Image (cartoon, rainbow, N blue to C red):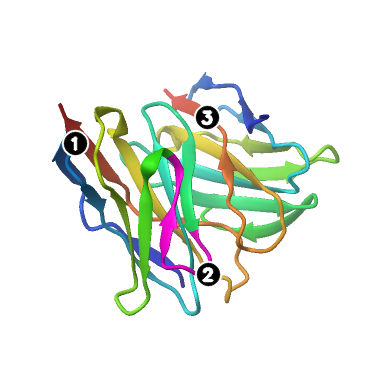
Amino acid sequence: AQSVAQPEDQVNVAEGNPLTVKCTYSVSGNPYLFWYVQYPNRGLQFLLKYITGDNLVKGSYGFEAEFNKSQTSFHLKKPSALVSDSALYFCAVRDPGTGRRALTFGSGTRLQVQP
Amino acid sequence: AAGVIQSPRHLIKEKRETATLKCYPIPRHDTVYWYQQGPGQDPQFLISFYEKMQSDKGSIPDRFSAQQFSDYHSELNMSSLELGDSALYFCASRQIGGLNTEAFFGQGTRLTVV
């Protein structure tokens, strides 16, 4: 079974500082990994994905994520946080080995960027 | 660009009533997913359709049913509503071109059962 863990319920960072939102996964094969962001009362917006290739993936709004197979991690990063980045972030996985097409989401991490 | 459209945006129902949620996928997307997100919870997969056939089933209660129509829109039918059904219901669509394509989500329908 595929699963995702986001160990931090909330991450606080000052504006201008780098941010990291952690994600680890468990799948039977090679994972397809995704990050989505959710603003209050809004749907989930796609940020970036890792399918294959370069372990560092760049996405929307200056976000990037690093795939680490040995640590089964896919942490979301941004070099300089903005107050407008404050939102709920979800890591998700799809295990192509199972043939299941639906995403499995982590529990979410609330990012608070202080001015 | 066209996005996933869900209607209604908000719905208030009483216990034991029925509700129907609608989802209109992005044009040319052939797969639709339904998710339920309770307060403070992560989205939980309910059910999905590919080319109008059910393709995967998650934690959808027996009281719920769904289908995808010839125009690819989908409806989630919920009967005998319970207070615990109060949640944000998301629809997402994807174009099958392999498992590596991302899903795009609608803004959700907030269902409140009173």
Whether labels 3 and 2 belong to a single chain: the reply is no
Q: Amino acid at mark 3?
A: Gln
Residue at the spot of label 3: B107
- Relative to A23, residue A36 above or below: above
Left or right, residue A40 beside residue A83: right
Q: CA distance from mark 3 to mark 2?
A: 29 Å
Whether labels 1 and 2 belong to a single chain: the reply is yes
- Relative to B11, residue B72 above or below: below
**Nearer the N terminus, badge 1 or badge 2?**
1
Q: Say which of marks 1 and 2 sits in front.
A: 1
Query: Could you tell me which chain the residue with mark 3 belongs to?
Result: B
What residue do we see at 61% from left, 47% from top?
A: B33
> Residue B98 lies in what quarter of the image?
bottom right
What residue do we see at 38% from left, 42% from top?
A: A62
What residue do we see at 71% from left, 50% from top?
A: B95
Q: Nearer the viewer, residue B74 or A40?
A: A40
Query: Could you tell me which chain the residue with mark 1 belongs to?
Result: A
Query: Could you tell me which chain the residue with mark 2 belongs to?
Result: A
Disc 3 and disc 1 in contact, CB within 8 angstroms: no
Left or right, residue B78 beside residue A16: right
Q: Amino acid at mark 2?
A: Thr
What residue do we see at 48% from left, 27% from top?
A: B110
Q: CA distance from mark 3 to mark 1?
A: 30 Å
Disc marking residue A52: 2
Residue B3 x %, y %: 64, 31
Per the rendered image, the range of residues in magenta is A50-60
Residue at the spot of label 1: A16
Disc marking residue A58: none
Secondary structure type for disc 1 = loop
Q: Say which of marks 3 and 1 sits in front.
A: 1
